[in-house]
Amino acid sequence: MKIIMLGAPGAGKGTQAKRISEKYGIPHISTGDIFRANIKEGTALGKEAKSYMDEGKLVPDELTVRILLDRVSKDDCKGGYLLDGFPRTIPQAEVLDKELEKAGDRVDFAIDVEVPDESIVKRMSGRRACLKCGATYHVESLPPKTEGICDKCGEKLSIREDDKEETVKKRLEVYHKETEPLINYYEKKGILETVDGMQDAEEVFSSIIAILDKQG
Ligand code: ADP
Ligand code: ADP
Ligand code: ZN
């Protein structure tokens, strides 16, 4: 099963992706997590990606696509995978489709998690992230068991550099311009599914399971 998570920054893609990945036993691949891991390790890729991410801009397609195709070529992706934060532009989606086609394969589901812009800024201001395992929390709606510490791996939680209000606004602008057109792209392919991201995380998860189990 190959799944794509769509939705604005902060819609809850990562939160759901973690749960889906555990339930269905497929790897959760987040291009944002890959970039952040590289920034943490101080690699050349990390340095390049950071300059775009800090400004709320997208990392160029060419670089992003290269990283993603390399990741999905790994053995653990043979039985399927879940993409979170990729594709973010039409050209990225086209490259992915072409690669899959070569292998007689395709994306099975594109799940759009819908949250209005007004709620996004609030979610982002309370987001706390684990830069080690990629888990995210929210100080009010999804707090960790111990304040400031990741439940899953014990790492200290961080506020992401790009979650400042001005940067979030820029990212939303970029989302509407570059990423939202993907909704129509996947709708035309007949694989778009929409879920209400304003529900509790548990309810959003149930809605997604209902979709995947119905047709999967
Ligand atoms: P969020 O979870 O808030 O949507 P991500 O962790 O997915 O954020 O992405 C953080 C940043 O990493 C983006 O703002 C962008 O700069 C960069 N990035 C991640 N994925 C992509 C992608 N597919 N194409 C271009 N840039 C990306
Ligand atoms: P994305 O990967 O789409 O950027 P995240 O999964 O990181 O989004 O979620 C953004 C923030 O909103 C995090 O602080 C997360 O804990 C919180 N969050 C996620 N899902 C919900 C939900 N259904 N209701 C309230 N807060 C949520
Ligand atoms: Zn962690």
Image (cartoon, rainbow, N blue to C red):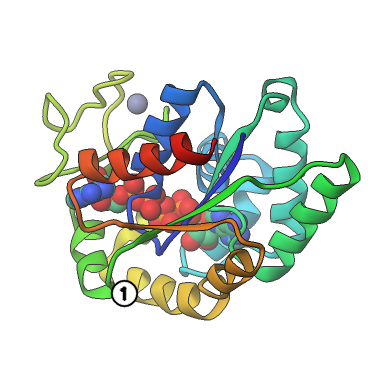
Q: Residue at x 48, y 24 (%)?
A: 24
Q: Disc 1 marks which residue? A: 166
Relative image position of residue 165 (x, y in whole percent):
26, 70
Q: Nearer the viewer, residue 162 or 68?
A: 68
Q: Quadrant of residue 213?
A: top left
Residue 181 higher or lower than 67, as above or below: below
Q: Residue at x 22, y 43 (%)?
A: 203
Label 1: state its secondary structure. helix
User: Is 90 positioned to the left or the right of 85 in the image?
Assistant: right
User: Is 97 positioned to the left or the right of 1 in the image?
Assistant: right
Relative image position of residue 112 (x, y in whole percent):
44, 58
Q: Tell me the quadrant of the picture where the C terminus can be found.
A: top right
Note whether residue 127 is visible.
no
Which quadrant of the frame does ligand 3 lie within? top left
Q: Quadrant of residue 61?
A: bottom right
Total numbered circles: 1
Q: Residue at x 42, y 32 (%)?
A: 20
Residue 167 higher or lower than 196, as above or below: below
Q: Nearer the viewer, residue 189 or 51?
A: 189
Note whether residue 38 is visible.
yes
Relative image position of residue 66 (x, y in whole percent):
77, 49
* Residue type of the residue flagged with mark 1: Glu
Q: Tell me the quadrant of the picture where the N terminus can be found.
A: top right
Relative image position of residue 206 (x, y in whole percent):
29, 38
Q: Nearer the viewer, residue 43 or 215?
A: 215
Q: Quadrant of residue 42?
A: top right
Q: Residue at x 71, y 61 (%)?
A: 92
